[in-house]
Each structure stands twice: as C-alpha cells, then as structure tokens.
Image (cartoon, rainbow, N blue to C red):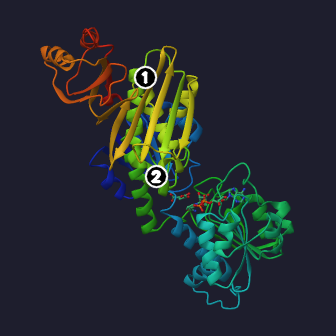
Amino acid sequence: MKVLVADGVSPKAVDILQGDFDVVVKDKLPAEELLKIIPEFDGIIVRSASKVTKEVISKAAKLKVIGRAGVGTDNIDITAATERGIIVLNAPEGNTIAATEHTMAMMLSMSRMIPIANETLHKGEWNRKKYVGVELRGKTLGIIGLGRIGSGVAKRAMAFDMNIIAYDPYLNEDRAQALGVKTGSLGDVIKNADFITVHMPLTPQTKDMLNKDNIAQMKKGVRLVNCARGGIINEADLAAALKSGQVAAAAIDVFTSEPLSPDNPLASAPNIVLTPHLGASTVEAQIGVAIDASHGVAAALKGEPVSTAVNMAPVSAETMGKIRPYLALSERLGCTVQSLSDGPIQSLTVQYNGEIADIDTKMMTIAVIKGMLNPILQTAVNYVNAPSMAKQRNIKIQEIKNKDVANFANLITVTLKTPTGEQSVQGTLFGTEGRIVAINQHRVDVDPHARILICPHINRPGMIGLVGSLLAKYNINISGMQVGKTSIAGTSIMVLTIDDDITQDIIDQVSKIDGIFDAKLVNFYTI
Ligand SMILES: NC(=O)C1=CN([C@@H]2O[C@H](COP(=O)(O)OP(=O)(O)OC[C@H]3O[C@@H](n4cnc5c(N)ncnc54)[C@H](O)[C@@H]3O)[C@@H](O)[C@H]2O)C=CC1
Ligand SMILES: O=C(O)CCC(=O)C(=O)O
C-alpha cells in the first residue's frame, strides 16, 4: 500500500511507515498535483497546507485514511470522506504545548511591543520612550475555549498572576474547578477582560464570534489574541478596532485565508503582531504529531481501530486499552455468525457478560458488524462505515449488557437472525488470545484463524473419519480439529481448521455425507 506524506510533515513519519508501506514524500504539493496523484494512494498525511477537498476525495479511488499531523481538520472534507468510508484522524496532543507556548509568546510580544522594538532597533533606532508596554500581572485574561490549549494557557497565565475568566459552553464545571479557573458567560468575558484569547475550532457557531458589536462592548484598550483559527475574530472588524484604538493591540497567528494576502485588512493594521501560523511549529511538536499521525495511519491501513479518528465515535485511550484485545475476536465472531447463516440478515444482537459489560463496547460492536459484512460486501467495511452500512441494509443492531457470568469472566454472545433462523456464537479471551467457546450452544474451544469448516452432525462414531477422508481425497490439510464438548439431542458439531483453499463444491460434498446436517466455511481471510 502507498502512503503520501505531504506538507513537510517530519521525517519521523517516513521512519515509522516505510517498513510496511511504500512512502512518497511531497513537501510542497500544489492543489492540481494532489488531484493528479491522489488515485495512487491508500493513505495520506497532511498538515494544514494541503486541502483534502470533496473533489480530491472523489478522485481518491484507493484512499482509506487521511491523517492530519495536527489538531484542526478544517482542511479536510470530513463529510465526503465519511461517505466514502475513509477514516480521518488527527494528532490532537502532539502540538498542544507548542500552541500554548506560542500563545504566551504572542501575548508577551504584543504587550511589550517586542517585534516592532526589535525591527526598529535593527534599523538603528534606540527608542525607549515609544515602546512602553503593559504588564500581564493583575490583568484579567478572558479565555474562550478551555480545551487542551485553553487550559494550558490558563495555567501559565496564572503563573503570571493574571486573573482568569473562561467561557466554554461545553466545559464540565468540575474540570474548570480542577484548573482553578472561574467561568462565566461570553458576555462576562467580553465586559471584564483586559486580554482575550480564543482556543476553539472554527465552526458556524464560532465564526465571527468576536465582531464589531461585541468588540465595542469590551474594555477600551483590550488586547486580543488568536492562535486558534482565522475568522473566529472578524478580521475587518478587528482591523477597524485597532485603528480606532478600541483594541490596543492584537496578536494573530491564523487567518481566514492562508498564506496571508496583502489585501487582508490585518496585514496593514496598526499595533498588531503577526506570525505565519507558527503555533505548532516547534521541533518537538512536529515530531510528536508526525509520530501520532503515522501510527494512526498505519493502524487504519492494517484494519485496526484508531483512537484519534475524528469521523468515528471517540474512544478514550483508557477504554481503548481495555477493548483492544477484544476487537479481533469481535470481528471473528461477526464473520463466523454470518458464515453460519443463510439469507438476508435481519438483526444482530451482541451481548456482553462480565466485567466488559461495564466498559464502552461501541467499538467492539462495530468490530462485529465489520466482521459480519466484510465477507459479503464489495465495498470494504471499516470502523467508519460499518454502522452506516448496516443501517443501509436495514439490519437492526442491538447491544445487551449484563454483568452476570457463568463459566467465563467475560463473554461475548453474537446472535444473528435471518428469515431461515437464528445462529449464535460465543467468544472470550484466554489471556490475550481470542477463542470461540460456543457455536449454537455447542461448547467448543476454537482458535478463530485461517479458515474453519463447521459441520453439525449426528453424534455417532465415525463421523470425523468420513469428513477427514473426503478432504484428504482433495489434498486438503486439516491443521486443527474440535468436536463439540456437549451433545445436544444426539447432535454434535465439528470444527476443522483448514490451511488450504476449499471450493464450494467440496463443501457441498461434505454437507451431503450421511449424518452431517450442514457444512459452512468461515474464511477469516475475508475480514
Ligand atoms: N495555531 C496553530 O498552529 C494551532 C492551532 N490549533 C487550534 O487551536 C484550537 C484549540 O485546539 P485544542 O485546544 O487542541 O482543542 P480542544 O478540542 O482541546 O479544545 C477546544 C475547546 O473549544 C471549546 N468550544 C467549542 N465550541 C465553542 C464555543 N462555541 N464557544 C466556546 N468554546 C467552545 C470546546 O468545548 C473545547 O473545550 C483548534 O482550533 C486548533 O485547530 C491547535 C494547534 C496548533
Ligand atoms: O500543522 C500546523 O502547523 C498547524 C497546526 C494547527 O493549526 C492545528 O494543529 O490545528
């Protein structure tokens, strides 16, 4: 598989990916070139320069994953990617410190006029009277958006003896208390702050959040910082307020259109410190995001779940640690139950018993769906599109959780209904090894790998020999064998692990052996 590493993402990404993938590096990637080459690639990693638009995605015939080496995914059309089942992931933590420190640097540069003082001194001007700044100490800092970066700024600003007031409508009050930050409404921030810094994504709600109307209500001489996304502070309104003196100074790292055009009103506004989107530009951050994004891309291309995917239900690192060992098993249970069934799938029920009933099992259920649909659909089913593929096919999905356990500490029971009946498979982990422990109530102990042939049969001597001889006739090697540990109403089940490919004709011959009720192949290579 081929991965494109664009936009000058750190070479660390190449180090991580090149063992498993064919990696192409394009530090500069004009939009036309991206459109031309994207059909070749299975994965791409970008920073903010490359725009992965709907048009790019429509041409990306093989693309399975888009990795963003950074936080903001506003340069990626996530809706278009999701419709195509393409995983979009980001690297949300690697550049937090860099953006936090950049915000502090911008606040200090702006309040002490360091850039202009530096520039004029280089020109030979020794001007100590003109560049008298203001202190941070004792000032009120309004933080809008108290996420990773906003919280980091709050902590550092407290060390500068600033009073903090934060506005974040989605923030849990406990979190604000833990940070020791006073919260208030947007109006409180607007009216009381001497400095305001914004740290949220650009969304329809946050676009132009600071504008001429509320800038007019701010304290005269307020200072504004934007190291989040261009457009959260309306650029024309800010430029006008800098000219009028309502805003004493501003420090801006991000713009509505990048690179900054000379026509942008901020380019010629007074008392403004500008940086060319440098928030994440530290050696450490670029290594951090490259490592995180490339591990995510590698996992996605190997069909493994990705905890930083932004177009899938988010899963915390802690939950991921707990569910990871169950994911391969869940997929295999889905594949097995589907292979045992005949006819259109009506419903799938996944029941979790034991301690796993206490954790967020959404992703495990998605893994079951993935395993169930991949063998029967042309379109590759992954963690992003599995739920919508099931919905499109009107398959009713149900999750049941029950802490009660009988023979196993944890048990997953997958039941699938079709018009011809119901099939059920149970699995658990022995250590970290997944095992199928029951098939339609027959107790077994099967390592679900390669291909397995499942044959319910009359419980009488000689049945195994009959199947074994038929397979031997076709030179098919049996590498593992299990017979149901219990007999139900005179029937049992045999499960044969087979290394070689097997044709439907041979399977049909097995199913016609006297005493064999059915023969179903589960091919784990199809998931
Ligand atoms: N300049 C640069 O190079 C960098 C910029 N960024 C940008 O900084 C921003 C913040 O990043 P993180 O702190 O990592 O994100 P985060 O997701 O940890 O925090 C965002 C916060 O914004 C809050 N929020 C969302 N809508 C809001 C609204 N309408 N009003 C107030 N608060 C709202 C959320 O509740 C959340 O707490 C993002 O836009 C990101 O793209 C991030 C890294 C580098
Ligand atoms: O990749 C970059 O340099 C930009 C970082 C950024 O804006 C983000 O992570 O949201």
Q: Is 334 situated above or below 359?
A: above
Seen as rendered, the residue at the extreme front is 489
Provide residue 193's location: percent of width, then percent of height: 78, 74
Indicate which disc residue 175 carries.
Answer: none
Q: How many marks?
A: 2
Point out residue 139 in the picture as x, y percentages from the top left corner.
Answer: 74, 82
Q: Position of residue 107 (x, y in %)?
A: 64, 76
Q: Ligand 1 is located in which of the four quadrants?
A: bottom right
| Residue 412 location (% of width, % of height) | 44, 39
Residue under the point 29% across and 31% down = 485
Q: Quadrant of the C terminus?
A: top left
Q: Rounded to the nearest whole Å, what is the CA distance between mark 2 and mark 1? A: 29 Å
Q: Nearer the viewer, mark 2 or mark 1?
A: 2
Quadrant hosting residue 326: top left
Res 487 quadrant in image: top left
Image quarter where the N terminus lies is top left
Disc 2 crowd rating (10 Å Cα; few below 14, some 14-19, many 20+) is many
Relative to 115, is 359 above or below?
above
Q: Does the CB distance between marks 2 and 1 fall below 8 Å?
A: no
The kind of secondary structure element at disc 2 is: helix
Q: Earlier in the sequence, mark 2 or mark 1?
A: 2
Q: Amino acid at mark 1?
A: Gln
Which numbered dot is residue 320? Answer: 2
Q: On the image, numbered disc 1 is attached to which residue?
A: 378
Q: Is residue 375 above or below residue 266?
A: above
Q: Residue at x 39, y 52 (%)?
A: 294
Instruction: Report whether 131 appears left or right of 279.
Output: right
33, 211: nearer the viewer: 211
